[in-house]
Amino acid sequence: MGLVAQMDQISGGSFILTRMDEVINWARANSLWPLVFGTSCCAIEMMMATGAARHDLARFGAEVVRPSPRQADLLILAGTIVKRMAPRLRTLYEQMAEPRYVIATGACTISGGPFVYNSYTTIRGADQIIPVDIYVPGCPPRPESLLYGILALQKMIKSGESLREPGIRKKPVVSELPPGVKLEDITLELRQILGDEGITNIPEEIARREWSTGL
Amino acid sequence: MTVHISTLNDRTTVPENSKSSLNTQEFFINMGPQHPSTHGVLRLVLKMDGETIREVIPVLGYIHRSIEKICEHNTYRQIVHLTDRMDYLSAVMNNWAVSMAVEKAAQIELTDRIEYIRTILAEMQRLQSHQLWWGVTGMDLGAFTPFLYGFRDREMLTDIFEETMGARLTLNYIQPAGLMFDIHPDFVKKTKDYLKYFKPKLEEYEALLSANPIFQQRLRDVGILDREKAVSLGATGPVLRACGIPYDLRRVEPYGVYEKVSFKIAVGSVGDCWDRYSVRMEEMRQSIQIIEQLIDNIPEGKFITKKPAAKITIPEGRYYSQMETARGVLGVLIVSTGKEKPYRFHLRSPNFNNLWTITQMAPGSRLGDLVAMVSTLDLVIPDMDR
Ligand code: SF4
C-alpha cells in the first residue's frame, strides 16, 4: 500500500503508523453499527439485549441498529439459517462495507442446534456460508452472553488489523487460554472423555440410568 | 381435468392492458424476507398501483426447519422440546398441546396439581406474549416507548419463569405425564406480587397508547376482516374473536382447569385493527383474573405421574387434539403405528391460517396501513413454516 511505503521512508514513520493503527482500531471497536438478522427464537433475546428495557447496548458504542446492510459493519445472526435463506444471508454479508464482523448467536448459527439431525433444510452452522468472528453459545443465549460476545469482539478488533497487515484478525478467545494450554489439548481431552464413556445407544442409556425425580 | 398451478412468476408478470385509471402502471415490490416490520423472515410480494395495494402474495419457507420430519425420528418426550422453537412466545402452551395429545392417546392420568400449574403457566405466558405484542405494535406504528415498557414488564415475568423452569424463552417445562420439575417455593408469592404490580401498569398502557388519537386513527377502520372470510380462511384466536365470533377453545372444549374459573371472552364488532388491538388488551385483563382465581388454590400432589425414563407408546391409530395458544388454535395430529415414535406428526399452526387473512384485508388500502395489519395479526414466522 502506498501509505505504508511512504511512511517507512520518513524518520519516525513506523512509529506514527503504529499509533494510527491504535487510533483506528479504537475507533472501530467503539462505534460498531450492528445489522440485526433475526430469523427465529434467538431474535427475541437479541432484541432484549440490543434495544429493550433491561440491557443497554449503547454503553458499548453499538446501539445504532441499522436495518440496512450498507450502513452496518457488524452482522448479528440470531436464529436458524435454512437453505432458502442462505443466499439472502450471503447477499447481505456481501453488501456490508469492509471491515465487517459477524457474531453468531445461538446453537443454530453455530452448528444447526436442535435441528442438526434429520433435518433436510437447516444449514449446519452459519460459518458454512459466511466467515464468523465470534460464537455465542446457548439456545437461546442470555442477553448478557451477547453483550459479552460484543465485548470479546471489541477486544479482537483492538488487537487486530493493522495498516501493514490488513485482514489479520486475532481471536481473543484463543489468545486468552492459560499459558501452556493449547486448543488441540482441549480437543483431545474432550474426545477422550466421550470415548471413555462409550455411549452409542442413547435410548438404552436413558432406560438404564436412574433419574432423580422425587417419585 | 387440468389443474393450473400458478407460480409466483406468473402472478408477478404485469399484463399489458393492466386496468388502472390515469396513465399509470402496476408494479411489484418485495417486503421482506429481511424487513424490520414483518417480525421475522416473512416475505410479502405486493402488487401496487401507486400507493394503493392491489394484491398481497405471502411467500413462505425462509425459516422452514422441517420440524414435522424431525418429529418422526424422535420419541414423544423428545418431540416436546422442538415445539418450544415453533411459536417461541407461547412455549408453554405448545408443550402442553403436544403433551395433551400424547396423554389423551396413551390414556395417562394426571393429578390436579399438574392441571392447575399448567393452566396458571399458560395464562402467564399469554400475558407475556401479549405484552411483547403490545410493545412491538407500538414500535411498528412509530412509538418507541411502548417497546421499552412492554419489555420491562415482560422481563419480570421471565425472571419468575427462570426460577421455576431454568430457562427464559424456550421453557421445556411441560412433558407428557406431568411437569419437568415442581414449582419453585417462591413461585406463588412472586406471581401474586407481580400481578399486583402489573394491574396498574395495564391502565398505564391504555393511557399511553390506546388513548393516543394518532394511534387510534392508524388502527380504526383499517384492515377490516369480514366474518365469513375469517371463518373460511380458518383464522382463530384474537383475529377471529375481533370479528365478533366468540370462539375460544378454553370455553368451547375446556381443558386443564378452565372449567372451574370464570372469565369473559373478549370479542370485537367490526373486525378492524383496532378491534384486534382491544381484544388483546382485554385478554390480558382476563388472564390476570384467571391466574388470581387459581394461584391460591394449587392442590398438593405429584408433579409427574410416570417415570421420565418409562417408555410412552401410543396404540395404533390417529389422534387429534387442539388447544388455544396466545395466537389461536394449535392442533396436533399424531398417526401412530404402536411404536415409541410417531409415524406421522402434523401440527396445525394458528399463525399460518391467520396470515392468509391479509390477502383479504389488504387490497385497496395504503402501503403504510399494511404495517398496522401485520402487527395486529401478531405473527410468529417460525410457527408458520415450522
Ligand atoms: S439456537 Fe435455539 S433459541 Fe436460537 S434459534 Fe436455534 S432453536 Fe431457536
Image (spheres, coloured by chain):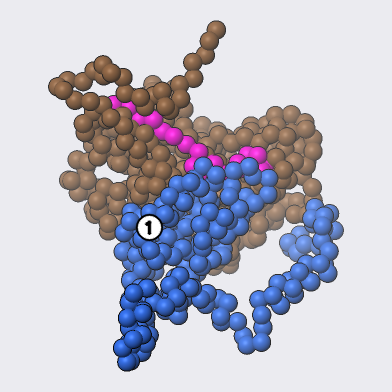
Q: Classify the position of the N terminus of chain B by image quarter.
A: top right
Cβ of mark 1 under 8 Å from ligand 1: the answer is no
Tell me if residue B60 is in the magenta stretch.
yes
Q: Which residue is drawn at 49% across and 19% down?
A: B5
Chain in blue on the image: A
Left or right of A160, for residue B223: left
Q: Residue at x 26, y 47 (%)?
A: B141
Q: Where is residue A85 in the image (x, y as percent from the top left)?
A: 49, 45
Q: Nearer the viewer, residue B173 or A199?
A: A199
Q: Where is residue B84 in the image (x, y as percent from the top left)?
A: 57, 50
Q: Residue furthest bottom?
A: A11
Q: Name the residue under label 1.
A: A96
Which image quadrant for residue B229?
A: top left
- Magenta part of the chain: B54-71
Q: Where is residue A122 in the image (x, y as percent from the top left)?
A: 59, 47
Which image quadrant for residue A28?
A: bottom left
- Amino acid bearing label 1: Met
Q: Where is residue B132 in the image (x, y as percent from the top left)?
A: 39, 53
Q: Residue furthest top?
A: B1
Q: Which residue is drawn at 19% across and 49% down?
A: B212
